[in-house]
Image: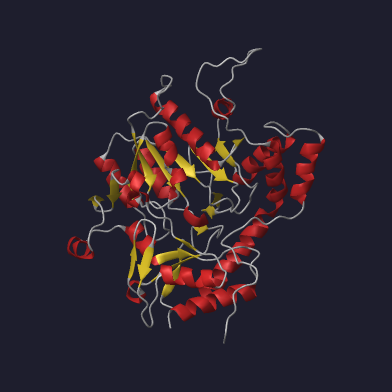
């Protein structure tokens, strides 16, 4: 059967508007509340805190801004307020997820800290608690852990929390991709001392941009609000006694988010149906879907991902910006599948490239279950039982088109294209 390219592109994940967004944006414009204060922001903060189950939420310009201020707040609580020009983590080490987007990690550098990357575990593709415990053995003075829930799947957060508590460490929970996901029936965003959500354009609920910092102490929320408005003091003139940032959320952006909020559960259900169609449609291939703990966790299924079994991988080599592969009968690789989908006008994406493989962080420490180390040759891995899970998933995995406006018929064609790559 001949397959024609899609007339309209099938996207990885795009915003899904419902109409109510326009109502609240128009209200902001009609009432002239278009800056960084207004009822839309107040409602987004209230609704988000209510949905997640936290006492306080602070609306910010982006999730990266939320992460930065969470890191700054954690550093101040741990080490005190720094001098002007110095970060709150100046010279301190912080444990971070290895396989994630670099926005999870960069705020540590903003505050003068040094990220140490913790390897990934295979059960959920998130931070490995065993490697985290090993990292505390190697670096017992660390007091901050930044943990993310990858692709909307909760990590082993109870185990990570117990390890952090045993070592008197704070947790920043990056729930940017997992709004609406639960672990033991509790929403992600509840497990960190400070947690963050993203409303970026491709997230399950979007404002085109925007983020939220979640916490339980009003004093902490007020501290973040002050920083986000250039640390202006309560004086009749512009008075500044510490560094601040222009990080507050726009009331117009908040209007889009406010209109999206009632549709969170609907979007999760649509994403779950996409995941299940891929799982069933690819069941006869030597692949597996991104995993989760079926007893403890319920993902939001933001992105459906696929991992090719090692014996079904054709040769593939990746440089810093380009990849090469050699096609073989009965085998395939992420590069071949992504190029095939792109040829038919469907968007996929490689798995997040691990941070310890990124040029900007290549000299930072990296901790696996076996201790400190880095991946080398395949022979070295076999001989020493060295395990770099994140690099392996990056090599064999890819993100599939997961847009909740994709029809079952379009998804069936994507599934057929993947099958043809293995012929």
From the viewer's perspective, is 194 left or right of 325?
Answer: right
Instruction: Using the image as rendered, state which of residue 316 and residue 143 is in the foreground.
Output: 316
Q: Residue furthest top?
A: 236
Please identify the quarter of the rendering in which residue 223 is found.
Answer: top right
Residue at point 48% right, 41% down? 192
Position of the N terminus, as image quadrant, is: bottom right
Q: x%, y% of residue 320?
A: 36, 56
* Residue 252 against residue 372 in the figure, above or below: above
Quadrant for the C terminus in the image: bottom left
Q: Which residue sits at x=29%, y=33%? A: 141
Between 164 and 344, the one lying in front of the other is 344
Q: Which residue extends farthest right?
A: 30
Residue sitting at x 45%, y 34%:
71
Question: Is 421 drawn above or below residue 51 in the view shown?
Answer: below
Q: Nearer the viewer, residue 40 or 251?
A: 251
Count of labels in the image? 0
Q: Is residue 290 visible?
A: no
Which residue ends up furthest to the left in the rendered image?
383
**Residue 363 locus on image (x, y percent):** 28, 44
Q: Is residue 40 in view?
A: yes
319 vs 42, left or right, is left
Say how the picture is coloured: secondary structure
Q: Nearer the viewer, residue 371 or 3?
A: 3
Q: Position of residue 100 (x, y in %)?
A: 43, 51
Where residue 42 appears, as percent x and y from the top left, is 69, 35
406 up-or-down from 192: above or below: below
């Amino acid at each position: 059967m001949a397959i024609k390219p899609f007339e309209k592109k099938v996207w990885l994940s795009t915003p899904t508007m419902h109409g109510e967004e326009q109502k609240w944006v128009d209200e902001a414009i009609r009432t002239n509340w278009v800056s960084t204060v207004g009822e839309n922001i107040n409602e987004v903060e209230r609704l988000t805190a209510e949905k997640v189950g936290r006492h306080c939420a602070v609306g910010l310009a982006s999730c990266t801004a939320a992460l930065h201020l969470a890191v700054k707040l954690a550093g101040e609580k741990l080490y005190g307020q720094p001098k002007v020009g110095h970060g709150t983590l100046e010279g301190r080490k912080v444990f971070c997820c290895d396989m994630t987007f670099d926005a999870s990690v960069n705020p540590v550098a903003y505050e003068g800290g040094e990220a140490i990357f913790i390897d990934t575990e295979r059960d959920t593709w998130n931070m490995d608690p065993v490697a985290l415990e090993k990292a505390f053995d190697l670096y017992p003075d660390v007091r901050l852990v930044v943990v993310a829930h990858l692709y909307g799947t909760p990590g082993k957060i109870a185990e990570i929390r117990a390890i952090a508590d045993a070592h008197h460490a704070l947790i920043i929970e990056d729930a940017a991709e997992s709004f609406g996901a639960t672990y033991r029936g509790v929403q992600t965003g509840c497990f960190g001392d400070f947690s963050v959500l993203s409303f970026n354009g491709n997230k399950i609920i979007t404002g085109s941009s925007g983020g939220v910092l979640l916490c339980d102490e009003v004093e902490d929320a007020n501290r973040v609000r002050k920083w986000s408005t250039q640390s202006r003091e309560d004086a009749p003139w512009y008075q500044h006694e510490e560094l601040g940032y222009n990080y507050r959320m726009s009331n117009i952006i908040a209007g889009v988010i406010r209109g999206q909020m009632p549709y969170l559960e609907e979007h999760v259900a649509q994403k779950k149906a996409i995941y299940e169609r891929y799982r069933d449609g690819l069941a006869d291939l030597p692949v597996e879907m991104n995993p989760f703990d079926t007893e403890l966790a319920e993902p939001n299924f933001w992105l459906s991902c696929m991992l090719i079994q090692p014996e079904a991988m054709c040769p593939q080599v990746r440089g810093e910006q380009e990849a090469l592969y050699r096609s073989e009968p009965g085998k395939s690789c992420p590069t071949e599948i992504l190029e095939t989908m792109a040829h038919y006008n469907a968007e996929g994406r490689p798995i997040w490239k691990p941070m310890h493989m990124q040029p900007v962080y290549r000299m930072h420490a990296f901790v696996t279950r076996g201790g400190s180390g880095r991946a080398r040759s395949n022979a070295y891995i076999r001989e020493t039982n060295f395990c770099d899970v994140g690099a392996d998933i990056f090599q064999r995995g890819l993100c599939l088109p997961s847009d909740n406006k994709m029809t079952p018929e379009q998804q069936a064609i994507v599934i057929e294209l993947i099958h043809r790559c293995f012929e």
